[in-house]
Image (spheres, helix red, strand yellow):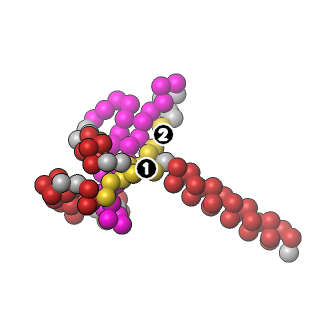
Amino acid sequence: MKRKTILIASVFLVLSLAGWVAAKNSCSVGATTFKEHYARVDMPETMRSTKFQGIKNGEAVIEVRRMSFLNRKQWKTRRIAVKLDDLDPAFRGEVEKAAATRPAASR
């Protein structure tokens, strides 16, 4: 019984920590910053990868991965989000169109 309790507590702790790390790597930005990152989506770059993830909960989401300067095998991932209401209508239409053409698995 004691082992089961320890196992459950350990699993809960790991899941909580994973959620905290995921939340820490996400940030909400303004429309101008989002547009700057959106311009880099799917561009070939050496130390950065920018992918449009789609629309979730009324926010457009971009994933930015950056390679470490010290270790080329180490990458840091950050998700950038903006509320769709904050975007100008023309750019919002472009983002919604891109989200509609993305595969469902990437949303």
Q: Is residue 83 above or below residue 34?
A: below
Question: Residue 42: where, in percent of width, then height?
Answer: 26, 43
Q: Quadrant of residue 60?
A: bottom left
Location of residue 11 by image quarter? bottom right
For badge 2, the amino acid type reads Lys
The x, y position of residue 91, in whole percent, is 17, 53
Q: Main secondary structure of the magenta part?
A: strand
The one of 84 and 60 positioned closer to us in this rendering: 84
Front-lying residue, 37 or 44: 37
Q: Is residue 78 magenta?
A: no
**Labels 2 and 1 touching (C-beta < 8 A):** no
| Position above or below: 76 against 59 | above
Helix, strand or loop at label 1? It is strand
For residue 27, the mark is 1
From the image, which quarter does the N terminus lie in?
A: bottom right
Query: Within 10 Å of the Cα at label 1, are there few (<14), some (14-19), or many (20+) other Cα atoms?
Result: few
- Name the residue located 52 percent from the left edge and 53 percent from the top edge: 22
Residue farthest top in this picture? 70
- Apparent side of residue 90 relative to residue 74 in the rendered image (left or right): left
Q: Which mark is residue 76?
A: 2
Q: Secondary structure at mark 2?
A: strand
Quarter placement of the C terminus = bottom left
Q: CA distance from mark 2 to mark 1?
A: 14 Å
Residue range corresponding to the magenta coloring:
44-70
